[in-house]
Amino acid sequence: MSRASMMMMMMPMSVKSVAVLLLAMACCCVCEPQANADCGGPSSSCSSLCLCCLSKDVAMVVEKLKTLESRLEENQRVVGVLRGQPRVAFSAALRDSGGGNVGPFSVATPLKYKRVFSNTGSSYNPSTGVFTAQVKGMYFFRFSMFSNTIGHSNSIVSLMKNGERLTSVWDTTGADGHDMGSNAVVIAMEMGDNAYVELLANRMVFDEYMNYNTFSGFLLFPM
Ligand SMILES: [Ca+2]
């Protein structure tokens, strides 16, 4: 079986049908010197015109096959990348039992989100609250904060990368003591980079079985 025949078998049915039709048209070429004058000129014989048209149509089909083969290789490359992409995703809430305030502490402290909903890739450590990138890539992180600050100090938490402050949520005490907010970031991470949510010194957050405070993230794509 020729390479052209094998490639035709691999093509989508609609494209194959077009190629077969072109070949059939070429093979059934009717001797019309005027219509096919550009194939061999007015003086060409009927048989030479038919062979000329056949050759021309086959060349066109081969060109289309080359284009399709190129597209197929590109699609296979993309599918291979997607299938081989490492999977990293996690989500956790602050408390795994009970309820009450977390903090205040005398120094800024990473919050330990202990109720793990998911941790594909095991890059998040619930005993420290720290996510450590094991894949270089672009990541999405999000956190939420709930405050119960009546009669207490303010609530301030920040999303940190390697000790650098990225985004924050803040709430003050007052008549509206129960508030919450969230923030997020999309950021490139090298292997070994870490991310965590930091409770600032002398601040506090509140949580219970409702799971108001969460920390989630996932790999958008490797780089
Ligand atoms: Ca408030």
Image (cartoon, rainbow, N blue to C red):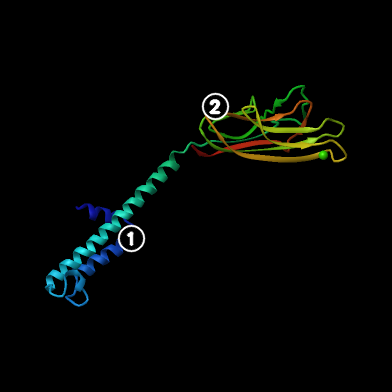
Taking depth in this image into account, of 41 and 141 the one nearest to the observer is 41
What secondary structure is marked by label 1?
helix
Instruction: Identify the residue at image location x=29%, y=56%.
Output: 65
Amino acid type assigned to the residue bearing label 1 in the image: Met
Q: Residue under label 1, please give it.
A: 13
Of the pair 12 and 118, the residue shown nearer to us: 12
Q: Viewer-nearest of labels 2 and 1?
A: 2
Amino acid type for the residue under numbered disc 2: Gly
Q: Residues within 10 Å of mark 1 (few under 14, many from 20)?
A: few
Seen in the image, is 171 located left or right of residue 68? right
Q: What distance separates the C-alpha of mark 2 from that of mark 1?
A: 49 Å
Residue 100 visible:
no
Task: Please give the residue where the numbered disc 2 appears in the rendered image.
Answer: 192
Q: Quadrant of ligand 1?
A: top right
Side of 162 relative to 17 (left or right) = right
Against 140, is 129 above or below? above
Q: Is residue 27 above or below residue 111?
A: below
Q: Is residue 172 above or below residue 61?
A: above
Q: Position of residue 84 (x, y in %)?
A: 43, 38
- Where residue 215 sits, quadrant-wise, is top right
Mark closest to the chain's N terminus, 2 or 1: 1
Q: Residue at x 75, y 30 (%)?
A: 98
Q: Kindly state the secondary structure of the residue where label 2 is placed.
A: loop
Residue at point 17%, 66% (across, down): 52
Q: Position of residue 218 (x, y in %)?
A: 57, 38
Tell me which corner region of the image, top left, top right, bottom left or bottom right, holds residue 148: top right
Crowd rating for badge 2 (residues with CA inside 10 Å; few <14, some 14–19, many 20+) = few
Name the spot of residue 13 as percent of width and height, x first.
33, 60
